[in-house]
Image: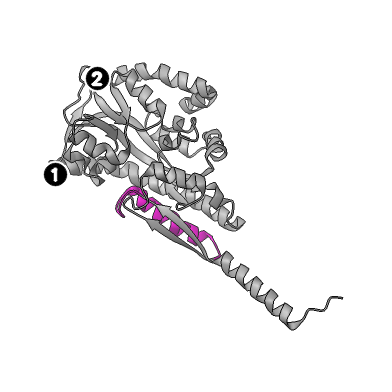
Amino acid sequence: MFNFSTKTMAVTAILLSSVATAQADITLRGASMFDEDHAFTQTLREFERLVAENYDGEVSFDLRLNGELGVESDYVTYLNQGVAVDYTILAPSNMAVFSESIPLMDMPFLFRDLEHWNAVLSSDVLAPLEDDLRGAAGIVIVGYHGGGVRNLASAEPITNMEELAGHRMRVMGAPIQAQTFDAVGAAPSAIAYNEVYNAIQTGVIAGFENEAASIQNLNFYEVAPHISLTQHTITVRPIVMSAATFDNLPEDLQAAVMQAGAEAGAFGRALESGADGEILQEMLDAGQIEVHEFEGREQMLELVQPVQDAYAAELGATELLESIRGM
């Protein structure tokens, strides 16, 4: 039989108490480029609420807004390294630096309509991309936000294929984005998101592509007031967590995070897809934008399909692409 001294027992009690305190005192750090009113931020707040509701232990959140911690490309680096940011919402193309296959889920012209988009995101068809992202980047997808319809925003009207030809426009960094818009005749270039406003203002580019909420939130309409309804993308915006953070959480908190991610994603998709047209109308009513129908969208679809096929084949994801198209 072992004999523990009073001192030994006291030290043991202190150590056990410290471990319990450390386990209880979990703070997760989040980041959003936008303010409280943006759909991204509202979805992250819902994620926080649901995690706390689903977890029996103590967990707190420190969500930094308005780009305080940088832009999405910075968040990707932080998540990969397990520093500064534990959870956020990202465009897949911004994660292409680590996982070249992940932008497939956000390819222009991938989804037929909102019903098709929601069916894909509510299924497990994207699991191969999730696995690749975790292995290559150390980033865990816990849910799917999105639903914004991306259109062209430009300094001058772009209403048809002829006017689109040679149009100097900003695209996100994934090669598939540039390849797609090159195929339809534009002149795309990857420019950091926080440089877009000045790049249009100074004539470096003539426009970009984005959804209504971001155009409104960051005042892009001041330099690109012409919105061309190409409706080329219905956005997929994963709610993500650093794998380094996730793997160190208690198992019951991991379960709470995954449940909250799925539920918050559904909340965010409904929020953004429903608000998209309303925000566009708000800017139109305020005289901030002019909206133009785009002639030639069917031609665009024909031109980009070979690009999609080649991209999927290069990634060994032809079957995945066919599964998405077949849903």
Magenta residues (range): 33-57
> Residue placed at 12% from the left, 41% from the top?
287
Left or right, 135 with reference to 107: right
Q: Secondary structure at mark 2?
A: loop
- Mark 1, residue position: 286
- Mark 2, residue position: 166
Q: Is residue 35 inside the magenta stretch?
A: yes
Q: Secondary structure at mark 1?
A: loop
Mark 2 is on which residue type? Answer: Gly
Q: Is residue 144 visible?
A: no
Left or right, 13 with reference to 41: right
Using the image as rendered, state which of residue 94 and residue 292 is in the foreground.
94
Q: For marks 2 and 1, give the one nearer the viewer.
A: 2
- Give the colour scheme of this rendering: one colour
> Residue 255's x, y, as percent?
57, 53
> Residue placed at 28% from the left, 43% from the top?
213
